[in-house]
Each structure stands twice: as C-alpha cells, then as structure tokens.
Image (tube, helix red, strand yellow):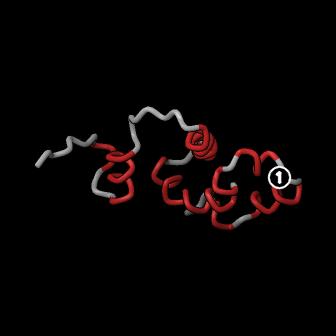
Amino acid sequence: MNEINRCHWCGNDDLYIKYHDEEWGKIVLDDKTLFEFLVLESAQAGLSWITILRKRENYKRLFADFDVDKVAAFTNEDIEKILLDPVLSVTD
C-alpha cells in the first residue's frame, strides 16, 4: 500500500485531507473547474482556505454549479441574493 506524504497544512481535517489528496497541486485544464477555483479563490480574500472548502457546496449552489454562461446571465437581483445569502457569512 502506498502511503501518501501529506503537507503539514492539511492537518487531520477530513475535508482538507480529501482536498490535498485529490485536488491540490493537480493540473486543471477544464474550464468549469478553473471557473470554480476563480470564484473560490476570489471569495477567500482574508479567509482561510478551509473556510472556503467548508462553504464550497454553498458556492456551487449559488453560482449555478459554476456554469459560467449561467453566471454571466445573472441579473442584479440574482447578485443581490448571493450577496445577502447567510451561508456565505465570514463568521463561520
């Protein structure tokens, strides 16, 4: 069995470990995944990455499963709903 040599930053948090083992450091060529990370990285400003990972499913829901065409068609009302959504609160 191959043991994975993990970076210290993922600690013992299951979500961080899954991210480290399955996504971190991997080449991404898929436009949808690149858009997802653009949204998530933008949201991270001032927050820890684990905070964003914990909110990832909410971002996925709010940003139309990271469908760039659907997001581009968002109205001002759609954007207002996203900005007011309590699950994206920085206090979590």
Q: Amino acid at mark 1?
A: Phe
Is the residue 34 above or below the residue 78 in the image? above
Point 15% across, 46% down: residue: 3
Point 60% across, 38% down: residue: 31
What number of labels is visible? 1
Q: Quadrant of residue 7?
A: top left
Seen as rendered, the residue at the extreme bottom is: 86
Is the residue 43 above or below the residue 82 in the image? above
Point 65% across, 50% down: residue: 66
Counting from the top left corner in percent of width and height, residue 56 is at 55, 56
Counting from the top left corner in percent of width and height, residue 34 is at 58, 38
Seen as rendered, the residue at the extreme left is: 1
Toward the viewer: 35 or 90?
Answer: 35
Point 60% across, 43% down: residue: 32
On screen, residue 47 versus residue 7, left or right, reads: right
Residue holding disc 1: 74
Tag 1 secondary structure = loop
Counting from the top left corner in percent of width and height, residue 17 is at 32, 52
Q: Residues within 10 Å of mark 1 (few under 14, many from 20)?
A: some
- Quadrant (top left/top right/bottom left/bottom right) for the C terminus: bottom right
Q: Quadrant of residue 26?
A: top left
Is the residue 89 above or below the residue 36 in the image? below
On screen, residue 42 versus residue 24, left or right, reads: right
